[in-house]
Image (cartoon, rainbow, N blue to C red):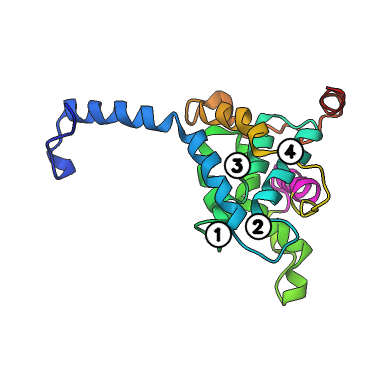
Amino acid sequence: MKTVKFTAMKDGTREEYEFLTAHETEYAAKTGDRLLDALVQLDEGLSGYKITRLGHSLQAATRAFRDGADTDWIACALLHDIGDIYAPYNHDEYAAAIVKPFVREQCFWTVEKHGDFQRLYYAHHLGGNPHARDRFAGHVYFDDCDQFCERWDQSSFDPDYDTLPIEFFRPFVIEVFSRKAYDPAVIRPGERVPLVNPEIARQRASA
C-alpha cells in the first residue's frame, strides 16, 4: 500500500490506519532534527536586539549547560522562544506545546509561563503589568520559572558572551524528542530538579 483509499476519515479501515500509524511513527522520530532546522529561522526573526533570536536561544542554552543543568532544562532553554517564528503573541504557549510530551512537567510549565515572568523586566516601561506572574504565586514551579528567566532568559542578549554553536546542542534535542511521548517516567508531575548543579557545572568547565 502506497496510500490509503479513503477521502473521508470515517471511511478508513483498520488496515489503513495501521499503515498511517507506521508512517506517523517514522515521521515523528525525526522531530528533533526538524526543530533544529526550524530554530535556524530565528536568525532572521525579530530585529533590534544586539543579537538575533537564534543567538539568544543558543546563549540561554549555553548558560544552562554551564550551570550544570540536565538535558530537559538545556533543551527547553534552547527551544523556549521557537514560537517567535509563527506565534509572536503567544510564543511561550507555542513552544510549551512542542516540548510538553517529552520533558518533565516542571520544564514544560516553565516554558509555558516564562512570557509572564519575563514581563518583570520590561512591562513597566510600556505601561504594562510587570507583576503578571504574581497570579502563579505559590505554584510548585514558581521559583523554577523565576530562576529560568533570571539566569538564562533575560540575561542572554550579550554579543560578547562565549555562546556554543547549535550543533553542540543537537544530542540534547535528539535525546529529548526520541523519548516515548507522555511517558510517566519522564513527565514526573510535581517533581522538581534544580536548574543549577554546581558539581556538574565544575565537571563541564574542566572538560
The boundaries of the magenta stretch are: 137-152
Alpha-carbon span between mark 4 and mark 2: 24 Å
Of the residues shown, which amino acid type is indicated by label 3?
Answer: Phe
User: Mark 4 sits on what residue?
Assistant: 164
Of the residues under marks 2 and 3, which one precedes in the sequence?
A: 3
Alpha-carbon span between mark 2 and mark 3: 13 Å
Alpha-carbon span between mark 3 and mark 4: 23 Å
Q: Main secondary structure of the magenta part?
A: helix
The C terminus: image quadrant: top right
Of the residues under marks 3 and 4, which one precedes in the sequence?
A: 3
Measuring from the top left, give residue 176's x and y in whole percent: 57, 30
User: Mark 1 sits on what residue?
Assistant: 90
Of the residues shown, which amino acid type is indicated by label 2?
Answer: Gly
Alpha-carbon span between mark 1 and mark 2: 8 Å
Of the residues under marks 4 and 2, which one precedes in the sequence?
A: 2
User: Mark 3 sits on what residue?
Assistant: 108
x 69%, y 47%: residue: 139
Q: Residues within 10 Å of mark 2 (few under 14, many from 20)?
A: many
